[in-house]
């Protein structure tokens, strides 16, 4: 499955051990999942995660911003959107939508109820919460039942 993670899901998955973290673990499993991102999404992630408000959490989990970003970059594929449409009320979210189109994603994962989740889908690509995406990835396939 080809996924695009909104920056809020990525940050939660990297810094805390809740559902977004379990989603990242499931994506790293041997099943064929791949996270796609873009340079714009990586720039947003870098800008947000380097804010002083996250330094205490980085210390708690025993890592640095640089190490966390390097680890994340190792597990993602870069997709380069040709253009970024103006869809969401938050221009940063438009980058996730554009990345999903460029990557031919099958799922966009977000925690943004006001801007992305409210859309439900974008050009046929479902937009789901981390919990919904995790449930989808970990559900037994019909051949395993």
Image (cartoon, rainbow, N blue to C red):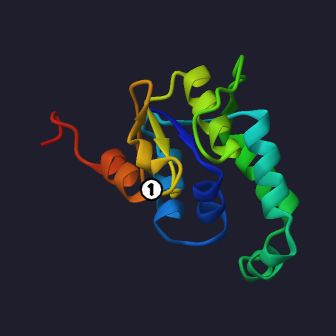
- Residue 14: percent from left, percent from top: 65, 62
Above or below, 25 against 78 in this view is: below
Quadrant (top left/top right/bottom left/bottom right) for the N terminus = top left
Residue placed furthest toward the left:
145
Instruction: Give SS at disc 1.
Output: helix
- For residue 21, side relative to residue 63 (left or right): left
- The answer to which of 121 and 90 lies nearer the viewer is 90
- The answer to which of 11 and 34 lies nearer the viewer is 11
Q: Which residue occupies 68% across, 25% down?
A: 79
- Residue 45: percent from left, percent from top: 76, 52
Q: Which residue occupies 61% across, 46% down?
A: 89
Q: Determine the image quadrant of residue 78.
A: top right
- For residue 141, side relative to residue 3 (left or right): left
**Count of numbered circles on the image:** 1
Quadrant (top left/top right/bottom left/bottom right) for the C terminus = top left
- Residue 96: percent from left, percent from top: 62, 38
Above or below, 27 against 49 in this view is: above
**Residue labelled with disc 1:** 130
- Residue 114: percent from left, percent from top: 50, 56
Above or below, 57 against 120 in this view is: below
- For residue 133, side relative to residue 80 (left or right): left
Q: Which residue occupies 54% across, 53% down?
A: 24
Above or below, 116 against 39 in this view is: below
């Amino acid at each position: 499955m080809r996924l695009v993670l909104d920056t809020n899901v990525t940050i939660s998955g990297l810094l805390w051990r809740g559902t977004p973290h379990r989603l990242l673990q499931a994506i790293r499993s041997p099943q064929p999942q791949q996270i796609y991102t873009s340079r714009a999404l990586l720039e947003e992630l870098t800008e947000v995660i380097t804010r002083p408000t996250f330094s205490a959490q980085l210390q708690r989990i025993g890592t640095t911003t640089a190490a966390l970003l390097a680890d994340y970059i190792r597990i993602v594929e870069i997709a380069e959107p040709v253009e970024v449409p103006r869809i969401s009320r938050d221009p940063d979210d438009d980058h996730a939508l554009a990345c999903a189109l460029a990557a031919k994603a099958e799922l966009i994962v977000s925690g943004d109820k006001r801007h992305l989740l409210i859309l439900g889908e974008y050009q046929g690509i479902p937009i789901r919460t981390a919990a919904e995406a995790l449930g989808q990835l970990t559900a037994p396939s019909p051949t395993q039942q």
